[in-house]
Every structure is written in structure tokens, then in C-alpha cells.
Image (spheres, rainbow, N blue to C red):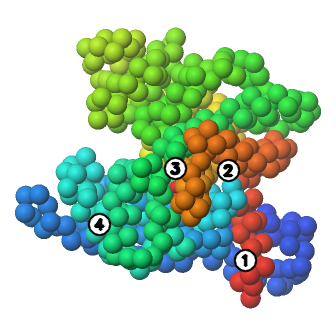
Amino acid sequence: MASQTGTIVQESLAALLKDSSFLPELQSESREQAFASLASILSTPNKIHKAFLRISMDNGEVVRIPAFRVQHNHTLGPYKGGIRFHESVNEDEVVNLAALMTLKNALHEVPFGGGKGGVVISPREHSAKEINLICQKYVHYFSDILGPDKDIPAPDMGSGDREMDWMMAEYKSIRPGEPYRGSFTGKSVVNGGSLGRREATGKGVYFTFRYMLYDFLKEQRTFLSNTDNKFAQTLLSYANKPMSIAVQGFGNVGSVAALEAHQCTLLQNKVVSVSDRNVMLYNSDGLDIQALIDFTTKNKGELPTTEEQLSLFDIKADIHDRDQVLDLDVDVLILAALEDQIHKGNMEQIKARIIVEGANAPVTGEADQYLSEKGVIIIPDILANAGGVIVSYFEWLQGRETQFYSEEEVFKLLVEKMKGTMDTILPQYFGDPFSLRQNCFIHSVMKLVTVMYRQGKLY
Ligand code: GLU
């Protein structure tokens, strides 16, 4: 498990070891031994599968493409997690992302374990036909380890409903007569996908922020005012105050979160900046997010980069270098692009007091510690971006029952689930010195440890 996740898991176990009210059945020596076993179980994936997909390109060339499926832990149910299509995919990264899925599912009481896949390609450089072949080959090579009750992939960066539809179709043809609807989630709605799955991650990202800044703050004001916790002070400083928001990444997660923020009537938000891999756009009066989404829909998902493009859609914004989004003087930064965006090299320049992790692992361990010490509230990935896997779970359930929910029902269930988690975690966070990430990890590890203990896995 790559360093940050591993370190926090170890710290969580150390905290639980000392807490005598946690698993009191485990006493003295056997307790120490059990916790040492847990550290090794949780810091290592159960299995790493690797294949070199043989792909015949459109030009006739035959190439080998590295592909992974990491099955981290299945204590709570079948392995679950997306398949990333990106040129920077590597084994360590997939292992770390798979571990985060185990913790994410445990945190939100989603009855799945954690897994992750990856294919080392730049999806933009391949034709639809080549991607189709890559999807088929991925399923072909890994078909023995996948399945609705074994390991259920979903979209991740660079993949979407098109890829899941193709993969499910391949799975179905490899295993005729077997259940197949739950083999992949994040499929298109006509093909058995769930309404609302595409927007689920972005909506969930915004919901966690809104719930803390509006609902929780309103209900718990007295409690927050009576503690000297530094995060509570940060939260209180935003009570009834207008907030400027910058969003890094304008894909499936960033664009939806930006639109939610823009349309939210409960908070006085102004989305002043959005960015993607080409550009950062800024307007201190707030950007027209809907117009930007309309532009990206017609332009291969990319934001406008010239004055002409902006005026064509009547968008008022200044054009800047993409990386400037991170050190803007804003209240809130929603990180919905890649991992490792805020790190040792730029953490001192960050001005936002609230950071929301829409992407997985966008803040490094060092930066997280530095900013948390300064009272910056960081809503971590496993808490904020779980909307995707939560609605994947609803999709899996709907596929089993072949009964489908309305979009309204899906969002209602999503919000209920995330609210349940927030209600468990937030009072602890604002009462103790740990960061929100540490609180979430402790909660997840507690759940996993308890179930492993009950299943007799610690002997
Ligand atoms: N790839 C998404 C994540 O990182 C969704 C996973 C899923 O739906 O299984 O959470």
C-alpha cells in the first residue's frame, strides 16, 4: 500500500489498540498480536493480477498494453472499484487506490470490499474500435476473477458507461447463462445502469461540503462554539458568510460539483474559478457554470481556451495558466482532477481554508498534515467522493431485482447514506484533535477489524 494510506491505517490501528473500550475481548498480549496481524492484513492487497493485453491497432500494428486488477480486501463483500484508463497507471498506484476502496466502502457501510483496475493507455489517442478491443481483452484476461459476487468493476478516470457496457457484454458472452447484470456498474441506463450514476460522485462531493457548512453548522452551533477545536473555529468562521469556490478538474466529478455549488440556494456560494488540463478560468463575480458545461459538451469535454470561444457562449472569464487554480485566494478548493496535486512543493501557497477531495488522494500526506495543523478543513476522498460507489451499489441491487428506481429515489437514497456517515463522523471530528481523514480511517478500520475478529481471522 503506498505510503499515505498505509501510514494512516497504521496510526488508526495504534489509536484503536490503546482504546480499551474497542474490542475489550482482546486482552494484553493477544491484543498486541492481533493488531500486528491487522496491520499486515490491511497494508497488503489479497491479490495483484497483471496482464499484457494483446491489441491489434487500427494501423495493423500489434501492441501489448499493461493492465491490472488489484483485489485488496473482501472482508465486507465482493471486491469493488473502478478501472482507470490513463497513461500514468502503475501497480503501486492501483494498489493504493484499491486500499482506499476498502476503506471507503467500510466507512459508508457499503457491503463491498475494495479493488481497483487500471490500463496503461491515453484514451484520447485511441479510436473507439481500439478502446472496444481493449475492453473486451481486459474482461477476457481477467474473466475468472470477475463476477457479480466476486469482483465488480466500475468507471474511473478515463473510462465511463461506454466502456462498462462493452465489458459487461464481453463478460456475458464468456459466461453464457450466468447472472451478468451485476458484473459491472456504471453502465448506461438502457443497458441496466442506474439513473443518477453519472452525476453521483459530483453530487456527493458537493453534498458533503454543504452538509458540513450548512446543516451541521446550523444544528451544532452551540456545540461548535463551546469547543476550542481549531477545525470548529474554521467552520464557525464561515457561518452565514459568502464563500468563493475554485474547482480543479472539469470532468464528470468537477463539473457536476461546480454546478451543484452554483445552483445551491442554502449557501452564498460563488464559483469563481474552474480548471482542466489546458486552462484555468477566473471571474471574481462568479462563472456561468451551466454555459461552461454546454461548451464542454460540444467540445470533447474541454473548457474554452480562447476569447473567441468564451464570447461564442457569452461566458465572462479571464484565461489563466491551469495550475494557478491551486493558490487562488478563495475560501474553498474542490480538487477533482488527479492525485498528488497539493504537496510539499506548493502547500505553503494554499490559501483556501476548506479543501474537498473529489479525486482520490489529491493531497499528499505531508501537505495534509501541514494544512490540518493550520486548521484547514480537508474533507477526504473516502468521505467526499463515495457517491459513485454508493450509487454503484444501488445499480447492483437494481440489477439483481430487475426493478429500477427513479432518479429522484436514487438521489434521496444517496443523500441518506452520506448523511448517515457524516452524522457519525462529524461530531467526533469537531471534538478531538485528529484530522477528518484520520477520523474516517479510524472508523473504517474499526468496522473492518470488528468483522475480521468476528469471522475468526485474527488467530
Ligand atoms: N471509481 C469510483 C471510485 O473511485 C467508483 C467505484 C465504483 O463505483 O465501484 O470510487
Image height check: is 121 above or below 416? below
Q: Earlier in the sequence, mark 1 or mark 2?
A: 2
At label 2, counting other C-alpha atoms closer than 10 Å, the crowd grade (few under 14, some 14-19, many 20 or more) is many
Residue highlighted by disc 4: 136
Of residues 12 and 139, the one nearer the viewer is 139
Query: Which circle, 2 or 4, is nearer the viewer?
Result: 4
Query: Which circle, 3 or 1, is nearer the viewer?
Result: 3
Residue highlighted by disc 3: 194
**For the residue marked with disc 3, what is the amino acid?**
Ser
Quarter-of-image position of residue 119: bottom left
In percent of width and height, residue 387 lies at 59, 47
Q: CA distance from mark 4 to mark 3?
A: 22 Å
Residue at disc 4, secondary structure:
helix
Of residues 323 and 392, the one nearer the viewer is 392
Residue highlighted by disc 2: 437
**Residue plotted at (46% across, 33% down):** 255
Q: Earlier in the sequence, mark 4 or mark 1?
A: 4
Q: CA distance from mark 3 to mark 2?
A: 29 Å
